[in-house]
Amino acid sequence: MTFSEENYLKSIYHLTANLDGEVSTNAIAEMMETKASSVTDMLKKLAEKDLVNYKKYQGVSLTENGKLAAKMIVRKHRLWEVFLVEKLDFSWDEVHDIAEQLEHIKSEKLINKLDDFLGNPTEDPHGDPIPDAQGRIIAIEKQLLSELLSNQTGICVGVKDNSSDFLKYLDKQQIGLGTKIEVLAKETFDLSLKIKINDTELVISNKIASNLFVKVL
C-alpha cells in the first residue's frame, strides 16, 4: 500500500471504531482534509484491493482484510509513541506527528522486535490500546470524566483529544495517566466540575472533562 492508502485506512478505522454501520465519504473527507471526490477515487482503489466495502451513496466500511491492515498501522503508530516517550524522553504531546511518519515503515520484523524491546505494551502514552501482532486488542474499562457524579473518584486512563494544546494543558494541571481525580461538585448550569488532584482543588470545564477517560474506583 502507498502512504496515502494507509492513511485512508487508518482514518476509516478510527471513524468506524464506535459505529456499527458505514461511515460517509464526507466524514472521511473532513478527517483527511480533502475533497469528497478525492475520497471517492481512493475508496474505489481500496475496494479493488478488498480493503473496504464501498457502494456509491451508501458509505464505506472496512473488510476483514482492511480491519487487520488498519490495526497493523495503528499498532506501529502506538508502539513508536511508546518508544519515543519511554526511550527517547519525548513528552506525550510531541510524539503523534513523529509517529505519523514512522508508522509507514514496512518491516514487520522490526515492529515485532520493537514490541518485544518495549516489553509488549498494551497501551500507548495517551492510554489508547495497542493491537498485538494478530490484531487483538485488550479492551480498557473507561468512561468520560464528565459522566462521573459528585463524590465519585476515578483514575485517568486516557484522553479523547490528543492534540498538543490539550496535552500541554493537562501537564500544567499535573493530570496524566494514573492521576487520581476526585469529583467534589458538578455545576448544573454549565456542567463544569470542581475536582481534587493531589490535595489541590480546581474547576475544569465540561469540554475538558469530556476529553478525559477515567476508570471509576
Image: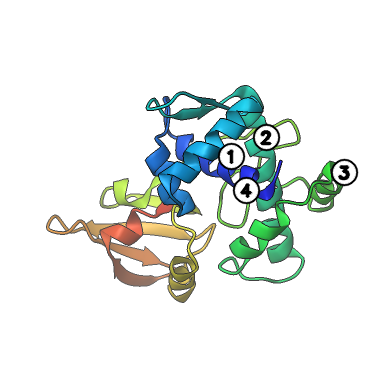
Give the x, y percent position of residue 211: 39, 55
The one of 150 and 60 positioned closer to us in this rendering: 60
C-alpha separation, residue under disc 3 versus residue under disc 2: 16 Å
Q: Are marks 1 and 2 in contact (CB under 8 Å)?
A: yes
Q: State the separation of the CA atoms marked 1 and 2.
A: 8 Å
Q: Which residue is mark 2?
A: 69
Check disc 4 and report the residue beneath it. Answer: 4
In terms of sequence position, does the residue under pointer 4 or pointer 1 come before the other? 4
Rendering coords of residue 111 (x, y %) = 80, 47
Residue 61 badge: none
**How far is mark 4 from mark 3, CA to CA?**
22 Å
Eye-nearest disc, 3 or 2: 2
Q: Secondary structure at mark 4?
A: helix
Q: Amino acid at mark 1?
A: Leu
Q: Amino acid at mark 3?
A: Lys
Secondary element at tag 1: helix
Q: Amino acid at mark 4?
A: Ser
Judging by the rendered image, the residue that carries numbered circle 1 is 9
CA neighbours of label 4 inside 10 A, class few (<14), some (14 to 19), many (20+): few
Residue 63: percent from left, percent from top? 59, 24
Are discs 4 and 3 less than 8 Å apart at CB?
Answer: no
Binning the other alpha carbons within 10 Å of mark 3 as few (below 14), some (14 to 19) or many (20 upward) gives few
First of labels 3, 2 by sequence position:
2
- Quote the CA–CA distance across marks 4 and 1: 9 Å
Front position among marks 1 and 3:
1
Disc 2 from disc 4: Cα separation: 13 Å
Tags 2 and 4 touching, CB below 8 Å: no
Residue farthest to the left, as pictured: 189
For marks 4 and 3 on the same chain, the one whose residue lies earlier in the sequence: 4
- Which residue is nearer to you in this view: 127 or 2? 2
